[in-house]
Image: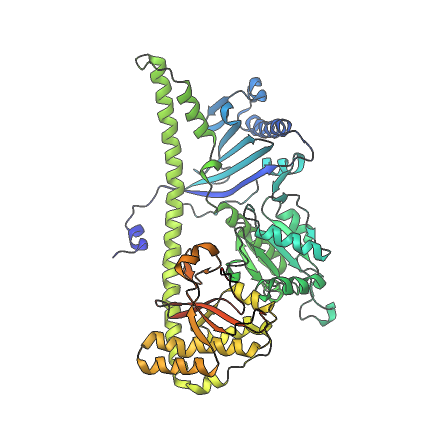
Amino acid sequence: MRSPVDSVRGVAARTRTVQGTYQLSATLGSEQFPEAEKRFEEARSLALWWMNRRLKSELGRGIPPPAWSGEPFEIDQHGQLYAAVTVPDLNLWTCRLEHDDQNVAARTWSVDLALRQVGSEVILVERTLCVSPATCIEPAPLNVPRIVRDLITKVGLNDVVPMTGRPWHLKASSDLELLELLLSDTSRLLPVVMLTEADGSAADRTYKVERFVLDPVTVGKDLLGLAHVVVMPRNLGFEWTNRMGKAWFAFNGAVRTFRPGLSFSNDDPYRHPLAKLDDIVLWEYQGALSTETLSGEPAFQAFLKQKMFQTIASRPLQQEDTLFYRYAKVRGLSAGTPPRVDASPVEQELRLEVTELRKQLDEEKGEKDYVYNYSADLEENLQRVERERFSLRAQLEALRDGLGAAAREQIPLPSSLLELEDWQRHVAGQLWIAPRAITAASKSGFRDPQLVFESLLLLANEYRQMRIRGGEDLRATYESALRRLKLSEARSISESRLGEQGEEYYVNHPFLAGKRVFLEDHLRRGTDRDQRNTLRVYFAWDRQEQLVIVGWLPSHLTTRNS
């Protein structure tokens, strides 16, 4: 069977690439303009002034006077387009700007902006596309459009919280609660960048850095329209770690990025990058934001900014977010077409509609081509990483088999469940513990932590070997180990009751994006209602990966009787 990569290699070379460099979906703030109609009009006016400045500069003319009150217009001259249209039944006004790149031949830019009033809210959606020849090697410049910056400063834009360009300095425990709500809010579309305070005095540090390795004020301004910036002082950093678990920590000058769609219960923390102080001060960067090689803190800040562009530009827009000019124009043409089809004005309208649909289709096809080929490259890299991972796993298995029981005896049994996250490296490749289980363990009052570690070793060794190799001897060995630890194994929940418990009995697969794993079995000891005296370890067996997936411990998950 041919892989996706093989299929792409057979596609003829494209004549151009369509790259999204920026996009934003937000609501207009209500502080400066409490009435939704006034917010809508003010934002439309700013967009028209923005278009008017470019139009006068490029073509030496202004937009038609009726356009200032929302009337449609279209100026298509010398390959440049300035246009806007209103769709009254959707409370929608949308505009489009197309212009040539001033520095790269045959490169063009298109900017779509839509404003839509829904009840008391006004929604803004903006998208910037760069269309380059397929042979072009010049990276597309990365900039937040001026109209977005103007809307932030003169009207206000919200992405769960206001986008101000000013860092949020956390000061009290109550701020941590608000931070957790912001990070886990499913409607958040911008990343959150957390800057942490470096430890100790300058004399005690390996590297001489400021209190915060990156200046919070500068970062806030630099990431305006790209991310929210949060400043975590050292004293609250410890409280944050205790609150959320070690998997979500950041301290001693580190910078952590929390991407949209975060779930503290099911997410892999590695999806939310952490850069430590030592890495930041030794960073090097050369890319779309600097033709010269940067080093140290300026290099990392440029790298961080580029990653923010990539994060927000790569988010697929929902269908309701794409009510842009071409859609609105086609809708207007369709609505204005009379029923008779034999008159020349009708034919003209239909021809215009077909032309606009072809333009829209061509643009969307270009975007999909770019994404498809980019995905193919990622697929090729993923396949290479998978081959390397399986090779390393085989080497690790051989090493463990060679060391035998002696290796297991060297694995510690800590007296605190706070060490669980670090401890799991001893069973890497055999057993994986979900982040939510690590967090639950760190907050647990279970009285026998060593039993938890012994149970995990049992799953990583006797249970795993029984599942891989089978046979009565290995089953007897596993059952003997269960009796020694006074544990029993049972199904976690019946099929009839599973639907009542929601997502509790599922976790995300650690390696396969989008795959959900049902925690069908659990180890148990004790029946006391006091969870300090009872142990439950919920797990599943992945036959393909030959991996035990632990999704929850050490307490009960919800059942009808709990």
* Nearer to us in this view, 289 or 246: 246
- Residue 177 vertical placement versus 59 (above, below): below
Q: Single out the residue that lies furthest toward the front.
A: 561
Q: Single out the residue that lies furthest toward the left.
A: 1
Quadrant in the rendering for residue 256: bottom right
* Nearer to us in this view, 212 or 501: 501
Res. 215 visible in picture:
no
- Residue 200 vertical placement versus 407 (above, below): above
* Nearer to us in this view, 128 or 442: 442
- Residue 461 vertical placement versus 305 (above, below): below
Q: Is residue 101 left or right of residue 213?
A: left
How many discs appear? 0
Res. 452 visible in picture:
yes
Residue at position x 59%, y 52% in the image: 183
Quadrant in the rendering for residue 1: bottom left
User: Percent position (x, y) of residue 393?
Assistant: 39, 73
User: Percent position (x, y) of residue 154?
Assistant: 67, 34
Residue at position x 52%, y 44% in the image: 141
- Residue 189 vertical placement versus 336 (above, below): below
Residue at position x 52%, y 33% in the image: 113
Residue at position x 29%, y 51% in the image: 7
Q: Single out the residue that lies furthest toward the top.
A: 343
* Nearer to us in this view, 68 or 513: 513
Q: Single out the residue that lies furthest toward the bottom.
A: 406
User: Percent position (x, y) of residue 555?
Assistant: 54, 68
User: Percent position (x, y) of residue 286?
Assistant: 53, 55
